[in-house]
């Protein structure tokens, strides 16, 4: 008879980046960066959504913020 001891691969020491989500699987921990970030989960970097020049309206400018972005009207509009 075999006994299996379930081990949470995400504890006690989180193997993922500070903002990443750790998912415990039968094969070990899987790290995923949250929305608005890119990377392998061990390292997560802010995704600059403003590189997409069409993300905001024609009379707006894009401001990249950690994990997201915001569109603001140009002054005078």
Image (cartoon, rainbow, N blue to C red):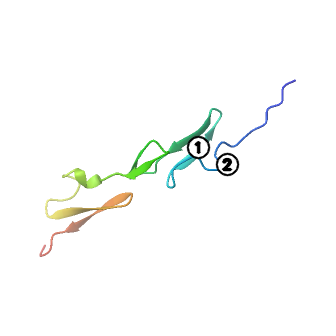
Q: Residue furthest left?
A: 76
N-terminal-most mark, 1 or 2: 2
66 to 6, vertically: above or below: below
Which residue is at 83% across, 30% downward?
3
Residue 66: mark in rendering: none
Residue farthest toward the bottom in the current orientation of the protein:
76
Q: Are marks 1 and 2 in contact (CB under 8 Å)?
A: no
Name the side, left or right, on which 28 lies relative to 17.
Answer: right
Label 1 environment density (alpha carbons within 10 Å; few <14, some 14–19, many ≥20): some
Give x and y (percent) for residue 15.
Answer: 58, 46
Helix or strand or loop: what does disc 1 sit on?
A: strand
60 over 20 or under it: above or below: below
Taking depth in this image into account, of 37 and 55 the one nearest to the observer is 37
Q: Which residue is mark 2?
A: 11
Residue 77 rendering spot, x and y as whole percentages: 13, 73
Q: CA distance from mark 1 to mark 2?
A: 11 Å
Residue beneath the point at 37% across and 60% down = 66
Residue 23: numbered disc: 1
Name the residue located 34 percent from the left edge and 51 percent from the top edge.
Answer: 47
Residue 65: x %, y % from top left: 34, 62
Q: Secondary structure at mark 2?
A: loop
Q: Is residue 56 left or right of residue 22?
A: left
């Amino acid at each position: 008879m075999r006994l299996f001891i379930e081990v949470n691969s995400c504890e006690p020491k989180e193997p993922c980046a500070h903002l990443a989500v750790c998912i415990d699987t039968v094969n070990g921990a899987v790290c995923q960066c949250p929305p608005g970030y890119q990377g392998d989960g061990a390292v997560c970097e802010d995704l600059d959504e403003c590189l997409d020049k069409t993300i905001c309206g024609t009379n707006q400018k894009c401001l990249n913020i950690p994990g997201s972005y915001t569109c603001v009207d140009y002054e005078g509009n």
